[in-house]
Image: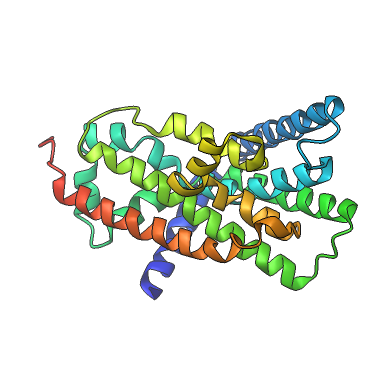
Amino acid sequence: MRRYLSLLVEYFLQYAKVRLAYKGDFLISVFTTLVATGLGVVVVLLLFGRVPRLMDWGFYEILFLYGFGLIPMALFNVVSINLYYFGDRYIVQGNFDRILLRPIHSMFQILFEQFRLESAADAAVGVFVVAYAARHLGLDFGPLDWLVLAFAALCGFVIYVSIFLMLTTVSFWMEDRVGVMPPVYNMMAFGRYPLKIYNVFLQFFLSWIIPFGFATFYPAAHLLRRAEYRLYFPLLPVVALACAGLAVALWNRGVRNYSSTGS
């Protein structure tokens, strides 16, 4: 474990040096990321300009959900860039052979060879929005609450990474340049709103099939002191570990199934 943590730091520092060599480009990327996130907040404002409450959820509660949802998603976006291009870059073009030659687990290399550093700005915005909404809701957030929030965001990050790793493994059996990730990625936004607004089938799907609800909604509802969802929060680390275990198992099986392109 110590070796992999050391390698992670080295990977990050090395990529940061490369990325920050073009500071103007990096700053523009950060700015566009913040603009896109700001537009998402504007959508929430416009929605509540027409509808004072969404079911029994008020504006600042929805804002809290949205802000919390930004944190695990931002962490995921920082490390997920290679997952989007895995089928094309590593399988079709044969670059996965290079990965297998190194004495490091292949999944570790795919996740941490590149970083989308500008996405970290969304996590900072998420923390600010959560603090702003909590203050207006009269929630007294102490150090313990922030530790719970950090733990919940980390579990959400693990769930996101695990789900998309599982989707990525499809490329080991089907050489598809695009893959199945884009439509599932768009579903992540569903977890930023109360699951109660969706039909029963979608609630079940987002809770137990592709558990985006556990990545964002259920922990945020717990932090909002929503008693009707209190039984879900203890399941959060269980769901995260189950997803991670399944992702690692599928990845290892996919690697055993991999056939070199010979290029």
In the image, residue 93 sits, relative to residue 77, either above or below, namely above
Residue 93 seen anywhere in this rendered image of the structure:
no
Q: Is residue 83 left or right of residue 28?
A: left
Residue visible at 56% across and 51% down?
A: 215
Residue visible at 27% across and 38% down?
A: 170
Residue visible at 39% across and 42% down?
A: 82
Q: Is residue 194 left or right of residue 256?
A: right
Residue at the left extreme? 262
Residue at the front extreme? 200
Instruction: Give the colour scheme shown.
Output: rainbow
Of residues 79 and 203, the one nearer the viewer is 203
Of residues 225 and 168, the one nearer the viewer is 225
Quarter of image, res 172: top left
Residue visible at 33% across and 56% down?
A: 246
| Residue 236 in picture, x, y percent from top left | 54, 61
The quadrant of the picture occupied by the N terminus is bottom left
| Residue 50 in picture, x, y percent from top left | 84, 24
Quarter of image, res 145: bottom right
| Residue 60 in picture, x, y percent from top left | 83, 45
Residue at the bottom extreme? 2
The quadrant of the picture occupied by the C terminus is top left
Residue 151 seen anywhere in this rendered image of the structure:
yes
Q: Is residue 142 left or right of residue 7?
A: right
